[in-house]
Image (tube, rainbow, N blue to C red):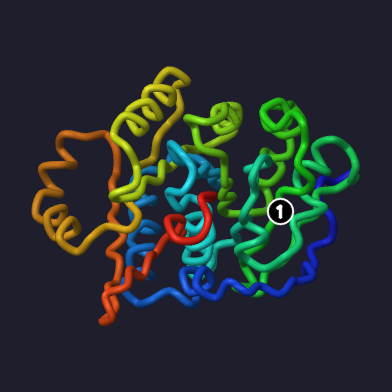
Amino acid sequence: MGFFANLKKKRTIKSNNESKQSMLHKNLKFAAKEQYKQIRENLSFVLPQDEKSYVIGVTSSVRGEGKSTTVINLASVLAEKDKTVLIIDADLRIPTIAKKLGIEKTPGLSNFLVGKTEKAPIYSSNINEKLFILPSGDIPPNPSELLGSERMARFVEKLRDSFDFVIIDTPPVNLVSDALALSPVLSGLIVVTRESFTEKRELKRCFRQLKLSEVKVLGTILNDASEDHAKNYRKSKYRYYRKSDYLKTDYLTPKPEDGNNADVTDNVGNDEKKD
């Protein structure tokens, strides 16, 4: 008995949030898309070389830092390099992947893990023929237990035979333990932060928990970076690499002429405080 349902198109629903769509995949501005491509190339230096495929978790310290948008855009640029990529929305508490992509969220991962569906409902995307999506499904009462279950571990191992990359959107580390429950099946974890939003104490707490759980951190991504910050980073990046075990990549946020902030990440400050 296989793990996967037949790959098929998932019925789309109408999305009225055009501003968020402008921050995703093909609608990204040139500078922002190039930054995602740079992250894609940087991953080749930090991922284990002895694995046949990679399972990458993406998390943050708190909500609103742009991790779900990062998941979609990173998966998209990986697929553009002729890699088969699966996005899993494992944020089973407040899922947003399906909403951002304008698709239905159920059935999905949770339905499969509790046995309501015999096979995982994996769907092809309209972004790239190499990109596939497993939505979150119905919100369960025990997300951490499901994600840390033997069924989830066997499922992820089976996915390695079918996909070059599995990108998993996980809840923030400081709020729940779900990302830590997934850590044994991950090749590594990416931590997303956001300039002028992420608090230093929250980020330190996040890395403290990851260190205690012996999670392999592939790097950090700074969303919504100002142009001045990006310039300063470029000047000091070689010194930074010598002093840190973590790979850091800035998103250079384009600034439109009217002065409004054209976020590469979720514009949570203006519309919703969810990632």
Whether 36 is drawn above or below 92: the answer is below
Tell whether 189 sits left or right of 120.
left
Q: Which x, y percent locates residue 136?
A: 71, 48
- Density class for disc 1 (Cα within 10 Å; few <14, some 14-19, many ≥20) is many
Question: Which residue ends up furthest to the bottom in the rendered image?
Answer: 257
Q: Which x, y percent locates residue 80?
A: 50, 70
Residue in the foreground of this view, choosing between 207 and 19:
19
Question: Which residue ends up furthest to the front in the rendered image?
Answer: 270
Whether 45 is drawn above or below 86: the answer is above
Q: Residue at x 60, y 61 (%)?
A: 84
What residue does disc 1 label? 135
Q: Which x, y percent locates residue 256?
A: 29, 78
Q: Residue at x 76, y 62 (%)?
A: 104
The secondary structure type at the circle numbered 1 is loop
Q: Amino acid at mark 1?
A: Pro
Residue 134's quadrant in the figure? bottom right
Residue 245's quadrant in the figure? top left
Q: Residue at x 59, y 50 (%)?
A: 166
Whether 12 is drawn above or below 42: the answer is below
Tell whether 79 sits left or right of 144.
left
Tell whether 191 sits left or right of 228.
right
Give the position of the N terminus as an image quadrant: top right
Residue in the foreground of this view, choosing between 17 and 161:
17
